[in-house]
Image (cartoon, helix red, strand yellow):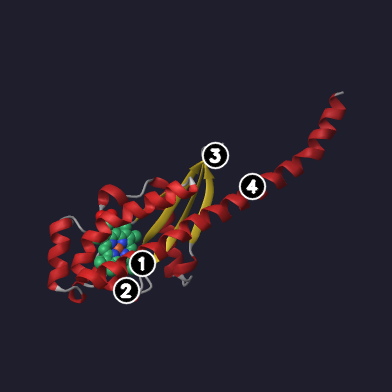
Amino acid sequence: MKKILMAATVLIAPFAAVLAHANEDALLGEARKVAMALPPKLIASLQKGIGESGLEGAIAICKDGAPKIAGEVAEQTGWKIKRVSLKTRNSARATPDAWEKAALESFDQRAAAGEPAAKLEMGAQVGNEYRYVKALPVQGLCLGCHGMPDQLSPEVKAALSKNYPEDQAVGYSEGQIRGAISVRKTLP
Ligand code: HEC
């Protein structure tokens, strides 16, 4: 009987490993899809805001709009979603936890070593959750609010210091990593 059990374990173990792997691949695919849903919505909302009330007006729109959009994606998908950064504008919302911080630091190192920022991602099962982060590279559009101080208009500077007196999220150039989208789901 013991022998049969052992044989069964030996036979089943590799299948269990394959199944676990397939499950992780499925979770990675799902997390990637959820994370990718956010940037186009944010950019559309930014462009609309900029068009209607200029960069400085769009700052207030971004302040209220970003969490609203993240909330909608969360409701539609069942994943929690947020943005995190090593240099936050809104530290109350965007301060990374230890896992996110380690991922962001490794993204910076990999980008410095020449990997394209847009391709950087990390997914893993952490405790009873599946977690995934995807780097957000700085594009031309971002510079008006996250660029070098001399690229920011006086109106933008004023709106930032009014809304975010502790702002650290300026001084970026194109291609650098501004932060990441972070998604997570509790596993059944
Ligand atoms: C109109 C000005 C504006 C533009 C343009 C802009 N942002 Fe922001 N960004 C903000 C504001 C305001 C916040 C803080 C939002 C909040 O209060 O949650 C922010 C926050 C963020 C955050 C969250 C982390 C943090 O520091 O609080 C990330 C990531 C981010 N922006 C990335 C980008 C990227 C990438 C682009 C270009 C595609 C971009 N932003 C363009 C104004 C802007």
CA separation, marks 1 and 4? 32 Å
Q: Name which of mark 2 and mark 3 comes first in the sequence.
A: 2
CA separation, marks 2 and 4? 37 Å
Q: Name which of mark 1 and mark 2 comes first in the sequence.
A: 1
Ligand 1 lies in quarter:
bottom left
- Horizontal side, residue 186 vs residue 66: left or right: right
Which of the two marks, 1 or 2, is nearer to us in this view? 1
Q: Which mark is residue 187?
A: 3
- Horizontal side, residue 166 vs residue 48: left or right: left
Amino acid type indicated by mark 2 = Leu
Where 181 sits versus 128, above or below? below
Residue situated furthest top in the rendering:
1
The x, y position of residue 126, in whole percent, is: 51, 42
| Label 1 crowd bin: few (<14), some (14–19), many (20+), radius 10 Å | some
| Label 3 crowd bin: few (<14), some (14–19), many (20+), radius 10 Å | few
What secondary structure is marked by label 2? Answer: helix
Disc 2 residue: CB within 8 Å of ligand 1: yes
| Label 4 crowd bin: few (<14), some (14–19), many (20+), radius 10 Å | few
Q: Nearer the viewer, residue 6 or 62?
A: 62
Residue at numbered disc 2? 141
Quadrant of the drawing holding the N terminus: top right
**Residue 90 seen:** yes
Amino acid type indicated by mark 1 = Ile
What secondary structure is marked by label 3? Answer: loop
